[in-house]
Amino acid sequence: MEAAMVSAFSGAMGSVLSKLAGLLEKDFKLARGVKEDIVSLRDEMSTINASLMELSQMEEPIDDLHRELRAKVRELAYDMEDCLDISMHRLGDPSKAGFLRELKSLRARCEIAKLISALKARVAQLGNRHKLILQLPERPRAVCVDPRIQALYQDPASLQGIGGHKEKVVEELQDGAPQLKVVSILGTGGIGKTTLANQVYTAIQGKFDCTAFVSVSRIPDFAKIFSDIIQQSGWYSISQDDNEIISRLRRRLQNVRYLIVIDDMWTIGAWNTIKSCFVENNCGSRVITTTRIEDTAKSCSSSFHGYVYRMEPLNDVDSRILFHKRIFHSEDGCPQHLKCVSNEILKKCGGLPLAILTIGSILANHQDVGSTEIWEKIVHSFRFQMERSPAFEWLRHVFNLGYNDLSLELKTCMLYLGIFPEDCKIVKDDLLRRWIAEGFVTEKHGDIQEEIAESYFNELINRNMIQIAEFDDCGEVFSCRVHDLLLDYIIIKCTDQNFVTIVNDQQSTKGPLDVRRLSLHVKHSSERNGVLENMALTQARSFNFCGPAQWLPSLTKFRLLRVLNLDINGSMDRRYDMSCIHSLFQLRYLRTNGIGSNKKLLTQLRKLEQLKTLEVAREDGYFVLDAQMLPSTLWHLNLPAVVKLAAGGIGHLTNLRTLSEFEIELRDVGRMKELGELTNLRELKLLGSYGVGDTSEVLLSSLCKLVCLRSIVIRRSLVEEDVLARWSPPPRHLRRLHVLECLFSTIPADWITHLHNLSSLEIEVRSLPSDGIVVLARLTLLVHLKLHVKEHVPREGFVVFHRVAFPNLRELWFRWEEPCLVFEAGTMPRLRSLVIDCYAKGARQADGVLDGIQHLGSLVEFKVHVYEREGYISWMLLCADLKSARVEEQRRWDKTSLKAALKEAISKHPGSLRVVIKYM
């Protein structure tokens, strides 16, 4: 597998080797002897890199000598790439001719010759040292006591919050089924999986003929695992051959009812070996596994009529009880003056029992346990405690286990999360683009970088290293967060490997080495200004800033930035000088929020030939931007509505994957045609603008060329009725279609049912036919549906959701003058949110509303927006007085009767719904 170009472990080693090879391949007309020196340098660096990869197999923590070697190689690789980048930038494109370019190139070639000679000397010096250190054996480590031992012998009376988990797992195991069943307990490290498994095991082991509780660990010894099962079951085996032991064990289990716990499972491969000893004997046997990896849990449970039980962190009440009982031996024993700081500590622990007990033990063993000063000292020294305190040894061990099991690429991506502050929701797409811009993601086997980056993100979730914060409307992960204590662990690693330097109001992690990535988060502290004044930033590769503009260092201090993120708050009236942005020739990612000078900034980007992501999150003034001023390398262009792209020029951005928001006037035929040239677009947000003339067909022609689209959002009407129904062929990859303001006369059955991948749909129809919902139900992957009806519902006056319809729908938003929905049993089994827009004086078809709402078993949120003014819901209600006499004679709702009917419907639901009835 090809290594990443940049990693936390080896720095820019992969990129250096690639660029040295590039110097040899391109026609640069280098000075005599330089090519031979480059070959020698490349070979020596390749040898060092191979040794470094061997060193990477050592598990954390490593000894000081090997850590020093790793640091020197890493910093050398960074410095080498910086020098090569600057020199090659000065050298320019060898294919371009001209006297001035030749003169400039001659000077650059002389500089490269000197550079290569200097680098050779530095590499040779390091090479001798690295060979010496690698010959030294790694120092033997002290054998750590496995923290799971404590979990096996904990007093049940001291446990808190585990009772509910225990009851559910026991219930699942004692369902009376004769088949072999596996329950896999899944959860992050330190959450109490081993404790829960042991409590369940202790509670039910007397009901089985033979029982065993064994641990696997990251590097399993299968002979020992199988022998331990045999011995704990009352048998014995002297064989050391795995196959013979498995055969003997299977014979023993053939006709008995057994209960076996396999604790700390890491890989599917290990499970596939272990499960071979289990016999499906229809005796009601049970197996419990514990793991922190979701794929492994699913593999375990899917083998034998299984079930995954996901452990969640303790809630606030259980966390508080556990913490206070550990310190004061009573859940109500915490003095009033300590409750505030106690809550701060518990927030940091985030419901992780191991963390709560660890900190509780430190305080309980302190002589002055009631001192506010001692408690506050703990709050402000978490990171120090995590790094050095013996009391945190078990917690470090738990985090090290997860970290050591990651690949080098995943370690790098995980450590990058250290740039974000505590409690931050990290948007997935933004994070992936940063990883790519930093060089952490390399294309492999034809897969594009974005897909590989997403696989890294998903694997970190799969391993419970990061937590899902929010889902988007398509049911995909929108954002994640990092547990506060794990973030402390990450920052310790970032500091140790000089990966990220963090400066905020409380601390600075700046060490003796050059700053490679700087994360600056300040609110009101002037103390850090002095730190920044003396900080050399010319070697920094990324800068992440959040705070007032007065604490923002000048961009002139940077030279080699790849990633620049500026979040300015509380100072929109203050301008920040971005005039030197064009000199950041390595910039690949640029995001600004509130800098107040975007107009000047956005006219200087053409020279940034590496730029792939440009996002302006907020702008305080309207202006027009010439698209010709943007580099053609852009993949993602996100602009606010107040920044308008000038007519003409967008067509040269043929690499664009994302375009938001792109304003089109109805009369602007040229711009509509240019849109069709962006054939790589995956996400498109269009903003309609008023104009004269009908150019719907021109726009449609361009949309038909965008065959890669995954998402399209259109705000403000751009097209005449039913134009989108003529989009042919339909975009088969489309997952999001939000076109509420592009009216359809009815559900376009022949067109919309071809959108097999659609997950999120927002659509308005003039008339909803009786089979309209049936047609939409063919879109079985729908997660989000927003349906507006402008004039007519089915003749019967009801919109029926039939059984087994919409198996994946989570959110339904329906708008019509009356809440006329009917739900059959079995419909929408996963629906969690139901929103209804209706009119307070709408036509009344029956005495009740929302018939069958009790069948929506997963529903947790119900909202009704009742519009009291005619014409508020589109213009359909404006026509209420213009309807036929037959309609006028119908009964109508009033505010009181509608409210009563809604409450009666809600009362039929068996769950505890969050109900909001809002009058608009």
Image (tube, grey):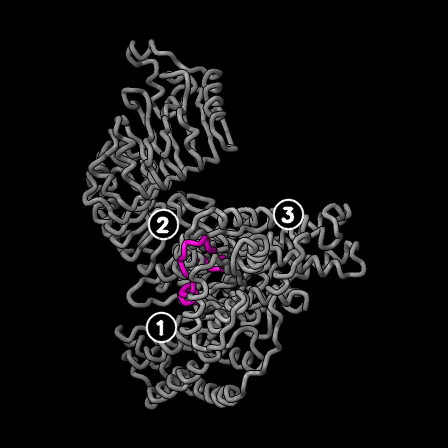
State the SS at label 2: strand
- Tell me which amino acid carries mark 3: Asp
Dot 2 or dot 3: first in sequence order is: 3
**Residue that sits furthest to the front in the current view:** 255
Vertical side of 444 occupied by 62: above or below: below
Q: Position of residue 365 (x, y in %)?
A: 76, 61
Q: Position of residue 488 (x, y in %)?
A: 59, 62
Q: Nearer the viewer, mark 2 or mark 3?
A: 3
| Residue underneath mark 3 | 318
Q: Nearer the viewer, mark 2 or mark 1?
A: 1
Which portion, as a residue range, is magenta? 270-294
Q: Give the quadrant of residue 301.
A: bottom left
- Tell me which amino acid carries mark 2: Leu
Front residue of 211/54: it is 211
Q: Give the quadrant of residue 845.
A: top left
Q: Give the quadrant of residue 191.
A: bottom right
Question: Is 284 within the magenta?
Answer: yes
Q: Nearer the viewer, mark 3 or mark 1?
A: 3
Q: CA distance from mark 3 to mark 1?
A: 47 Å
| Residue underneath mark 2 | 625
Vertical side of 825 occupied by 255: above or below: below
State the SS at label 1: loop
Residue drawn at (62%, 58%), measured in percent from left and top?
354
Question: Is 619 within the magenta?
Answer: no
Dot 3 or dot 1: first in sequence order is: 1
